[in-house]
Amino acid sequence: MFNFFKKKEEKKEKPKNLKLIALCLAFEVANADNDIDTREKNLILEKIKESIDLSVLTEKEIFEVIQEESQNRVSFYDIINDINKNLDKKEKIDVLKMLWEIAYADKVLDVDEERIIRRSAEMLGIKPTIVLQTKEEFKNQ
């Protein structure tokens, strides 16, 4: 009877392609120096296998889709916006960790890779201290 006055709890459903969105950001990091090393590409393929249903497309086909999206996009603001809207703080930090892991996959941190990661972290509202902590995790691996 009084259900009318109760606030409806709306479960905000996350977009199914959110993992793909995060992988697009990882691709931007790997491609920052305009040269995706085979170790970076293999790590992205591994992340695709871990996080995306491969029943429709293979990880290589998904990688090609990500590559095409990157070429068609002017900026990665939309990616950051989607992540901001749909992920909590811990999930954003997990995305940040993946970006550092991709950047260090070839054992060389390019200036442009770091710039994209730091800018992304800033836009995601991640504190600089956390950015440095997560960077250190992957720096010496």
Image (cartoon, rainbow, N blue to C red):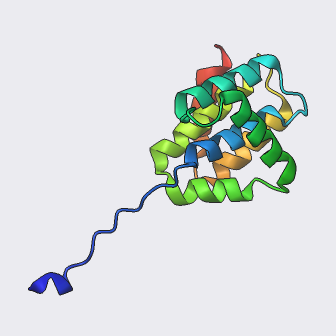
Left or right of 52? Residue 121 is: right
What residue appears at the point 47 percent right and 55 percent down from the top-left corner?
A: 14
Answer with the quarter of the image where residue 115 lies.
top right
Q: Residue at x 69, y 48 (%)?
A: 120
Q: Nearer the viewer, residue 48 or 99?
A: 48
Rendered location of residue 122, percent (x, y): 66, 51
- Would residue 28 be visible to someone looking at this image? no
Residue 73 position in % (x across, y down): 82, 54
The reply, left or right, for residue 43 in relation to residue 75 is: left
Image vertical order of residue 138 relative to residue 7, above or below? above
Q: Tell me the quarter of the image containing the C terminus.
A: top right
Return the x and y of residue 22 as percentages of the image width and height.
63, 43
Residue 48 location (% of width, % of height) = 62, 31
Q: Check the image and name the residue furthest to the front.
A: 56
In-image side of 10 versus 44 (left or right): left
Q: Going by the picture, which residue comes out furthest to the left?
A: 1
Task: Give the total of numbered labels.
Answer: 0
Q: Nearer the viewer, residue 93 or 58?
A: 58
Q: Is residue 56 visible?
A: yes
Residue 98, picture quadrant: top right
Q: Residue at x 82, y 44 (%)?
A: 68
Q: Quadrant of the N terminus?
A: bottom left
Q: Is residue 20 above or below residue 84?
A: above
In the image shown, does 32 or 47 lie closer to the viewer? 47
Residue at 58 percent of width and 31 percent of height: 134
Return the residue found at the far right: 34
